[in-house]
Image (tube, helix red, strand yellow):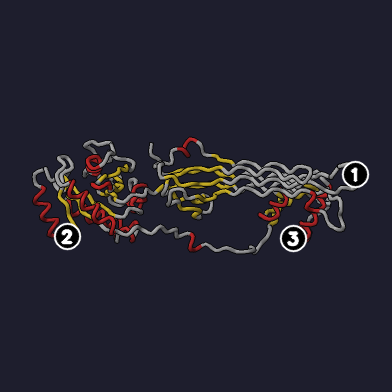
């Protein structure tokens, strides 16, 4: 089954917790702290695989969580880092953050790897907190949570040649005759509902990939029919074959069909309108085709190449294939662009490090920095709580809560951790 869109949840592995331990060895008095650090959580990694042609694997499993890092141990032994989870996806897949719409990755090469959810770092053991004023710290950190978000995957097929045209003009028949692809073929509109790929072999071991793009209709650039679903797959083709029913067998004018589809490609993407095009006049075996073919030649006036073929009988297909094989090496490969990325702005420090909102007697403090500190604090250890209180003071959260009118006994919520204000 062909699926070219998917929505999945990914979460990097949490880091392991740091250990609180002290050396207890014979002949080593007052050995000092020896708690090791926790291991780093495993990343979620996407890897391009040219052997895959669909996102069907992500239809049945939509949640992926990374391997957690092991906790630190005594004798300054660090925990094992989590193993990276590698997910193979088809080459040509664009990865978006579903919440922000930001482009995270564009997988365009076989073996290309992109970390889409980083694992959290391991918490520090108590050996890291020893100082001249604190020789025996009982403080350690919990592991940092891994990055988590929902991703939207969109597959844009990577093919050398794309067949476009109205429904039922013979695109599927053409690709079935020149390659080993076996698309569904029938005498009604929209027989093809998903793109089909076929490898066309030429003499001397040369070959190219051809994509049968399902039939377009007028208004496809606005999403009419399945316009956006189909047009997306034309973006990365090097050469476009515009297939026409030159016989006018369905009482449509081939010249009008040519204008409509060219306009749909231009409105969807101006770059597509500049892509090299070969016009394929199909169904030459039907009476009346010669007359329409001459009208087409007069209209085009040599601006575009025209190949008269009959997919039903095979007439003209070999000459078309040889011509494609000759022009492809000279055809420029479309540039892969991610327009969202060029508008991305990175700030070292945001305007607000935290925000406070009040719900009755509950003060809720939010912000990525303070929430991370809360998740990495062991609240069952006095030394850890004392350190967290100092962080609140240094970040100015204490003063901000007082300015909001907090009183003795009111509750504060930070990252789901509730405690009484004292």
Mark 2 to mark 3 CA distance (whole Å): 70 Å
Label 2 neighbour load within 10 Å: few <14, some 14-19, many 20+? few
Mark 1 to mark 2 CA distance (whole Å): 96 Å
Which residue is denoted by mark 2 in the rendering? 300
Q: Earlier in the sequence, mark 2 or mark 3?
A: 2
Q: Residue at x 39, y 42 (%)?
A: 53
Query: Quarter-wise, where is residue 296 in the image?
Result: bottom left
Disc number at residue 315?
none
Mark 3 to mark 1 CA distance (whole Å): 44 Å
Q: Can the viewer see residue 223?
A: no
Q: Nearer the viewer, mark 3 or mark 1?
A: 1
189 vs 400, nearest the viewer: 189
235 vs 331, nearest the viewer: 331
Which residue is denoted by mark 1 in the rendering? 27
Q: Can the viewer see residue 128?
A: yes
Q: Residue at x 73, y 47 (%)?
A: 37
Disc 3 secondary structure class: helix
Q: Earlier in the sequence, mark 1 or mark 2?
A: 1
Q: Earlier in the sequence, mark 3 or mark 1?
A: 1
């Amino acid at each position: 089954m062909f699926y070219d869109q998917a929505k999945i949840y990914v979460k990097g592995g949490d880091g392991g917790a740091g250990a609180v331990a002290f050396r207890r060895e014979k002949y080593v008095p007052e050995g000092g702290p020896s708690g090791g650090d926790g291991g780093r959580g495993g990343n979620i990694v996407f890897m391009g695989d040219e052997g895959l042609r669909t996102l069907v694997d992500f239809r049945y499993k939509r949640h992926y969580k990374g391997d957690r890092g092991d906790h630190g141990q005594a004798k300054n032994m660090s925990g094992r880092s989590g193993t990276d989870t590698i997910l193979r996806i088809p080459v040509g897949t664009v990865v978006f953050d579903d919440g922000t719409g930001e482009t995270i990755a564009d997988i365009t090469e076989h073996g290309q790897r992109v970390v889409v959810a980083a694992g959290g770092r391991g918490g520090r053991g108590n050996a890291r907190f020893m100082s001249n004023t604190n020789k025996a710290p009982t403080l350690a950190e919990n592991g940092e949570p891994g990055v988590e978000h929902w991703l939207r995957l969109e597959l844009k097929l990577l093919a050398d040649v794309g067949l476009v045209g109205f429904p039922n003009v013979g695109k599927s028949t053409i690709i079935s005759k020149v390659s080993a692809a076996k698309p569904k073929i029938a005498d009604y509109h929209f027989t093809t509902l998903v793109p089909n790929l076929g490898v066309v072999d030429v003499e001397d071991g040369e070959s190219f990939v051809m994509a049968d793009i399902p039939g377009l209709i007028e208004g496809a650039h606005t999403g009419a029919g399945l316009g956006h679903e189909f047009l997306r797959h034309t973006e990365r083709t090097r050469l476009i074959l515009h297939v026409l029913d030159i016989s006018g067998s369905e009482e449509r004018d081939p010249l009008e069909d040519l204008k409509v589809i060219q306009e749909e490609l231009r409105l969807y993407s101006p770059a597509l309108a500049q892509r090299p095009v070969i016009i394929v006049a199909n169904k030459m075996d039907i009476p009346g085709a010669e007359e329409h073919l001459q009208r087409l030649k007069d209209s085009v006036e040599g601006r575009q190449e025209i190949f008269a073929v009959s997919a039903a009988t095979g007439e003209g297909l070999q000459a078309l294939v040889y011509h494609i094989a000759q022009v492809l090496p000279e055809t420029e490969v479309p540039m892969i662009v991610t327009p969202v990325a060029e508008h991305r702005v990175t700030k070292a420090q945001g305007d607000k490090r935290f925000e406070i909102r009040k719900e009755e007697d509950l003060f809720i403090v939010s912000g990525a920095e303070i929430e991370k500190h809360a998740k990495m604090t062991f609240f069952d250890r006095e030394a850890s709580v004392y350190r967290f209180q100092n962080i609140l003071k240094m970040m100015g959260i204490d003063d901000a809560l007082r300015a909001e009118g907090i009183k003795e006994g009111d509750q504060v919520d930070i990252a789901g951790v509730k405690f009484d204000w004292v």
